[in-house]
Image (cartoon, rainbow, N blue to C red):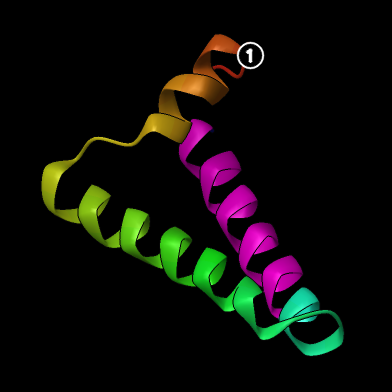
């Protein structure tokens, strides 16, 4: 369940930052890149800070 929540959060962050890049300022694409880089590093290291945060918020595995 934690994994699904983390993926949902990442997808939401990406979509929001893309909308902000289109309607506010293109600098928001850096946030999109940040989320993408974190997803990529977690696939290699099997460690994700958002996993820890979501688990501490009470989402069960």
Coordinates of residue 8 in the picture (x, y in percent): 63, 52
Coordinates of residue 41 in the picture (x, y in percent): 22, 54
What residue sits 55% from the left and 64% below the top?
31
Coordinates of residue 12 in the picture (x, y in percent): 69, 60
Q: Which segment is the magenta one? A: 2-18
Residue position for label 1: 57
Rendered image quadrant of residue 43? bottom left
Rendered image quadrant of residue 1? top right
Vertical comparison of 40 with 23: above or below: above
**Callout 1 secondary element:** loop
Residue nearest the viewer, comparing 39 with 61: 39
Coordinates of residue 5 in the picture (x, y in percent): 60, 40
- Residue 61: tell me if it is visible: no
Vertical comparison of 1 with 27: above or below: above
What residue sits 64% from the left and 72% below the top?
28
Q: Residues within 10 Å of mark 1 (few under 14, many from 20)?
A: few
> How many numbered markers are drawn?
1
Q: Main secondary structure of the magenta part?
A: helix
Left or right side of 42 for 55: right
- Residue 53: tell me if it is visible: yes
Left or right side of 55 for 26: right
Based on the picture, tell me whether residue 17 belongs to the magenta stretch: yes
What residue sits 19% from the left and 40% below the top?
46
Left or right side of 39 for 9: right
Vertical comparison of 43 with 29: above or below: above
């Amino acid at each position: 369940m934690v994994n699904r929540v983390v993926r949902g959060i990442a997808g939401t962050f990406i979509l929001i930052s893309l909308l902000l890049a289109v309607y506010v300022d293109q600098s928001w694409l850096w946030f999109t890149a940040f989320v993408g880089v974190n997803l990529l590093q977690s696939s290699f290291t099997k460690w994700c800070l958002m996993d820890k945060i979501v688990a501490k918020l009470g989402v069960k595995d």
